[in-house]
Image (tube, rainbow, N blue to C red):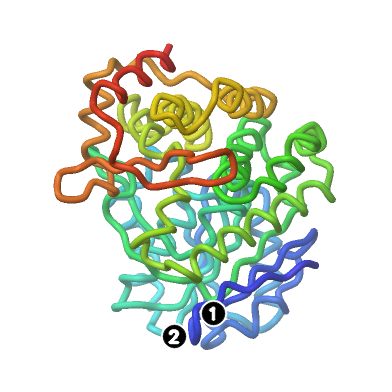
Amino acid sequence: MRTLNVELDERSYPIHIGSGLIADPELILPYLKTRRVAVVTNDVVGPLYLAPFVAGLKAQGLRVTEIVLPDGEAHKDWATLNLIFDGLLSDRCDRSTTLIALGGGVIGDMTGFAAATYQRGVPFIQVPTTLLSQVDSSVGGKTAINHPLGKNMIGAFYQPKLVLADIGVLDTLPDRELKAGLAEVIKYGLIRDLPFLEWLEANIDRLLARDPEALAEAVERSCRNKAEVVAIDETEQGERATLNLGHTFGHAIETGLGYGEWLHGEAVAAGAVMAADLSRRLGCLSDADVARVRVIHERAGLPVRGAALGTARYLELMAHDKKVSDGTLRLVLLKQIGQAVISAEASQDQIRASIEACCQ
């Protein structure tokens, strides 16, 4: 088992990475306030892992509430969030109950938001079951639900007590989901860790083949990058925004097509290529650099062209982005491969040109 720490003073917490971790409830026990927990999962992960996971907790003398939500980004909304509250209230869960998110990014985001708001805050633990959630969304305390006008617009910064990343559960992850997770892995290499990008270029085939050692290495190096950034800028006042490379374009795709039509990682991949193209137009990247960004995503089996929403629709949706400040759109771009920058320098004409050049 590999262990990292997210250093946030009294709110610091560990990330455990390894195989078979969800079968070991003793890893969870030290982080519980009492022996009362509520496990939140969905109707895809639940049939695979909920029963043995809950049985392990009950064998340790825990009282467990089970809450099963419908699967998918389309359900990351108020109505589904209320199903968590319904389950907690119906079973009389109190402030000492620890919520456990057993699932991918949607489950983690919604369980975290429920924990942040239920009775004004209860503890929670992340047990991510997708590559994307293991390398990104489970770490750092961003919790949210979507709004019809924008993705992740309603939420809170609320840190978990523990992240338990079991590489073994990736064996049951559909290929499309695995590839989508690689978009967030590649992102770390592009924005701040050139040696990691070079490692990915050499090992992408091992990751696609689900080599356990390669996956563990990718998850650890991704989480290390994420933890370092979160420790510096927990609430995204500066450097943490660079973790959103490709997300402004990508969120526009997700919102414009309808949540769930493209997976988050797919939209981020296309968005990263668009951001690279725009960086080239600003004189930061060469044609060869842009090609390098495109090729690593292509090799991962990810889309490198955005959805055909139309330029005007992209700009309309991007205007709702959380990085907009005082009416000015700020984008995460690449100063060079391995170094991201938050920039408001791109003109509307340059942004339009990149959208038109990079969309279907």
Q: Earlier in the sequence, mark 2 or mark 1?
A: 1
Front residue of 285/50: it is: 285
Query: In the rendered view, does 172 fall on the left or right side of 243?
Result: right
- The amino acid on which the numbered mark 2 sits, given as a three-letter code, is Ser
Front residue of 151/280: it is: 280
Query: In the rendered view, does 153 fall on the left or right side of 138?
Result: left
x and y, in percent, of residue 317 in the image:
25, 32
Residue in view at x 15 percent, y 44 percent:
327
x and y, in percent, of residue 118 in the image:
32, 72
Q: Label 2 vs label 1: CA separation?
A: 19 Å
**Residue closest to the far top:** 360
- The amino acid on which the numbered mark 1 sits, given as a three-letter code, is Ser
x and y, in percent, of residue 340 in the image:
48, 46
Residue in view at x 33 percent, y 17 percent:
353
x and y, in percent, of residue 194 in the image:
66, 45
The count of marks equals: 2
State the quadrant of the C terminus.
top left
Front residue of 118/360: it is: 360
Disc 2, disc 1: CB below 8 Å? Answer: no
Please give the residue where the numbered disc 2 appears in the rendered image.
96
Task: Name the secondary structure under disc 1.
Answer: loop
Q: Quadrant of residue 240?
A: bottom left
Task: Name the secondary structure under disc 2.
Answer: loop
State the quadrant of the N terminus.
bottom right
Please give the residue where the numbered disc 1 appears in the rendered image.
12
**Residue closest to the far front:** 283
Residue in view at x 51 percent, y 62 percent:
229
Q: Nearer the viewer, mark 2 or mark 1?
A: 1
